[in-house]
Image: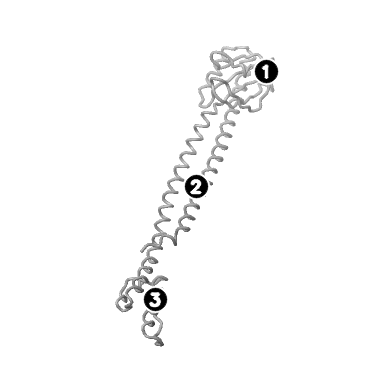
Amino acid sequence: MKIEKLFQRTRFGIFAMFGAIVLSTSVLCVLTVSTELSAEYEINTSNIAKTVANSSVDILLNRDLATLQSLVDQFIEIQGIRYIYITSETGDYLAHTFVPGIPDEILASDHRSTEPVERDLPGLGIFLEVGSPILAGVAGHVHVGMDLDVVALKIQRAIGQQIYLVAVILVIGVLAAIWLVNLAAKPLGELLAYAVELARDGNPEALADRAVLARNDEAGHLARLFLYVARNGKEPGAMSPAPQPAD
């Protein structure tokens, strides 16, 4: 005898609760990981720009542009850094890593600006550019472009691992909840089957050996109450002592 309807709302509530937990956790993971990794890459890019600016002071004073180009080529090998260019105080491009040439959007930008700016360069991608002055801008400026596609890939990998763990917890939690609900429904099913059998048979003594009567929980108490009522119903006016709960 099944009692599915009794626990429909309970199961729906469990599914809804786990769904809300997974959704809120996923959103929090996405926002946290995205914000933290983006901020970390931006700080690293800014530090690289400052390092290049500090390293290029003596080179610029000696006007050794070949060494300056070699310097920026070394930093471009760092993961996530896609381009570096150095301008003079007058806006001349002293060294850069663009091949074959400097994009028009870079040429049209303000070389003195050091504020982080997002650039969408056709054929290259989307970048976060950070600048740093050389000798407070007197000797020029260094600009470093960070590839946002690399950052997005890192974020996806980090989020994917966390979402995978949350999904596993969701599946295990739902299966455990279903098992616990079925565990709670089993004695009620036995009680319902006993009550139906008792009403159909009409002979309480023939059903006095059922396993549900030996249970020491609410199902057992109700089963013994049903048996008590069935026995007293056979003898109008007779009162027998109420059954004691089994220990």
Query: At 55% from the left edge and 16% from the top edge, which residue is drawn?
Result: 98
Name the residue nearer the viewer: 221 or 54.
Answer: 221
Numbered label attached to residue 226: 3
* Amino acid, disc 1: Ala
> Tags 3 and 1 in contact by the CB under 8 Å rule?
no
Quadrant (top left/top right/bottom left/bottom right) for the N terminus = bottom left
Name the residue nearer the viewer: 168 or 83.
Answer: 168
Q: Position of residue 211 (x, y in %)?
A: 32, 71
- The crowd level at tag 2 (other Cα within 10 Å; few <14, some 14-19, many 20+) is some
Q: Earlier in the sequence, mark 3 or mark 1?
A: 1
Q: Nearer the viewer, mark 1 or mark 2?
A: 2
Query: At 63% from the left edge and 27% from the top edge, which residue is drawn?
Result: 117
Numbered label attached to residue 158: none
Name the residue nearer the viewer: 107 or 180.
Answer: 180
- In the displayed structure, 93 sits above or below 25; it is above
* Secondary element at tag 1: loop
Query: At 29% from the left edge and 77% from the top edge, which residue is drawn?
Result: 206
Q: Position of residue 217 (x, y in %)?
A: 41, 71
Q: How many marks?
A: 3
Query: At 33% from the left edge and 77% from the top edge, which residue is drawn?
Result: 202
Q: Earlier in the sequence, mark 1 or mark 2?
A: 2
* Amino acid, disc 2: Val
* Amino acid, disc 3: Phe
- The crowd level at tag 1 (other Cα within 10 Å; few <14, some 14-19, many 20+) is some
Numbered label attached to residue 139: 1
Q: CA distance from mark 3 to mark 1?
A: 97 Å
Q: Nearer the viewer, mark 2 or mark 3?
A: 3
Quadrant of the rendered image containing residue 27: top right
Numbered label attached to residue 22: 2
Residue at the outermost bottom position: 237
> Tags 2 and 3 in contact by the CB under 8 Å rule?
no
